[in-house]
Image: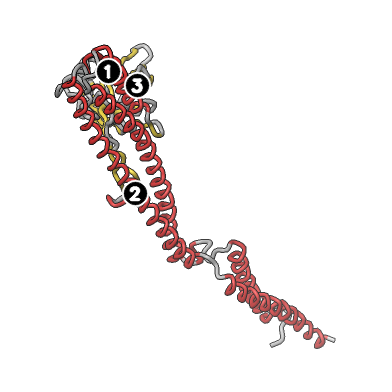
Amino acid sequence: MSSIVTNVAALNGQRNLNITAAKMGKVLEKLSSGYRINRAADDAAGLGISEKMRAQIRGNSQAIRNAKDGISMIQTAEGAMDEIHSILQRMRELGVQAANDTYDSAARTSIGTEIMQLRQEIDRIANATSFNGQNLLTGALTGTLGGATGTDLVVNDAVGAAIATEINVAGAKPGTYTFSYNSSTDELTLTGPSGQAQVITVSAIAANGSQTLNFNQLGISIKLNSTAGETADNIGAALTTAANDTIVVTGSGAAALQVGANTTAYDVMNVSFNDVRATQSTGLNLLSGGGVDWTSASTIVASNTAAQAFINQIDAAITTLNTRRSDLGAAQNRLEHTVNSLGVAVENLTASESRIRDADVAQLSTQLVSSQILQQAGTAVLAQANQSSQAVLSLLR
C-alpha cells in the first residue's frame, strides 16, 4: 500500500537510529569515565560487589595508616625509655662509686644529691612523654571510671529522680573531677584535677526521657535517664551532694589499635604502655625499702651497706625497664608485619575491584566504531525512507 500519511520505513529507521545513539552514548560515557560500571543499571551485581571491595580497600588503607601511627607511638615511648635507661645506668654507676669506703659522709651526700636529681628527671621524662595528648609512660593512657557508690558518681547512681546509666571517661585524664552548680543560670561546672573546668547548661528531663551531660573538653560524658522526669535544679542539686559530687578517673595503659578494615577481634591489636615513673610502685619502684632510704640525699648511700642495697634496687629497676622496652619492641615488629600484610591485601583487592569496575578500552573502542558506522548507515537509510514517500506524488500528476 502506498501512503503519504504514515511512513513506516522512516519510523523504523528512526527507532533503530535512536537505539544506536543510546548505545553510542553509553560507550562514550564509559570511555570518558574509565569505568565499565557508572550506575547500578550498568551491572547491578557487579556494582554491589565492587562497592564492598572499595569499602575493604579504603578500610585497609586507613588501617595501614593506623598501624604506622601505632609504630610512631611506640617509637616515641621507647625513645624516652632509652634515655631513662641511660639515667639508671648512671645511677648504678654512682651506687658502685658510693659502695667504696674511700668516701666520707660529705662525699656520699654529694653522690646522693645527684641520685635524687636523676630520680626526679626519670619522673619528669615519664610524665612529659606524650603522643597526640596521651601520656605514654604513666600507665594511664586511657581513662577508666573509678570511685565508690557512697562518695562518687558511678554508673546506676541515682541523680534525683534520674539514673546515671552511662558514664564515659575514656578520653579523660586520671584524677578526681568535682561538680558545682549555679541554680540561677542552670549551669553545671565540672572541674578537673589540674584546675581545668568546663561549664554546660542543664535542662529538664521529660518523663521517660534522657539527657547527656557532655563535658567534651574534659573527655567525660554522663547519660541520665528518668521515668518520671526531673527538673534541671534537682539534677544540679543531686550532682553537688556529697555522694555524687565527684567523678574519679583511673588510668589504663592499654592502647587498642585498629589494624583492620572490620570490627572483629582480629582487626584490633592491643599495646600496653606501662608505668615507668621512678617514684611509683607500679613503675620502677625506686622507693624506700630493702635497705634504701630515699628520705634525703644524705641517707640514700650513707654507707657501704646502703650503697649495696641501692645497687640491687637499681638492678631491679633496670630489669623492669628491660622487660617493658622489649614488650614495645616486639609490638613494633608485629605492627611492621601488619603493615606489610595490609599492603598486599590492598593491592590484591584493588586488582580485583579493577577487573569488575574498570572499562576495557579496547573492547569499547570496537563498540564505538561499530556504533558510529550504524549511526551513519541509519542516518542514510532514514534519508532514503523519507525520500521514498515523494514517489507517490507521481501518481497525482
Q: Quadrant of residue 15?
A: bottom right
Q: State the residue in front, 182 or 7.
A: 182
Figure quadrant of the C terminus: bottom right
Q: Nearer the viewer, mark 3 or mark 1?
A: 1
Mark 1–mark 2 distance (CA, rounded to whole Å)? 39 Å
Q: Residues within 10 Å of mark 1 (few under 14, many from 20)?
A: many
Picture quarter containing residue 322? top left
Cα–Cα gap, marks 3 and 1: 55 Å
| Left or right: where 332 falls relative to 387 | left
Looking at the image, the residue that sits furthest to the front is: 102
Q: Residue drawn at (25%, 19%), measured in percent from left and top?
A: 246
For disc 2, the marked residue is 333
Q: Amino acid at mark 3?
A: Val
Secondary structure under the numbered disc 1 in the rendered image: helix
| Residue at (26% x, 28% y) in the render | 92
Assign a secondary structure to mark 2. helix
> Disc 1 designates what residue?
112
Q: Is residue 287 visible?
A: yes
Answer with mark 1 or mark 2, whichever residue precedes in sequence.
1
Going by the numbered disc 1, the residue's amino acid type is Gly
The answer to whether 228 is drawn above or below residue 189 in the figure is: below
Name the disc covering residue 300, or none: none
Disc 2 marks a residue whose amino acid type is Asn
Going from N to C along the chain, the mark reached first, 3 or 1, is 1
Which residue appears farthest toward the right when viewing the image? 397
Q: Which residue is mark 3?
A: 202
* Residue at 59% from the left image edge and 70% from the top image edge: 361
Q: Residues within 10 Å of mark 2 (few under 14, many from 20)?
A: few
Assess whether mark 1 and mark 3 are in contact (beta carbons under 8 angstroms): no
Using the numbered discs, state the Cα–Cα distance from disc 3 to disc 2 in whole angstroms.
49 Å
Is the residue marked by circle 3 packed among few (<14), some (14-19), or many (20+) residues within 10 Å? many
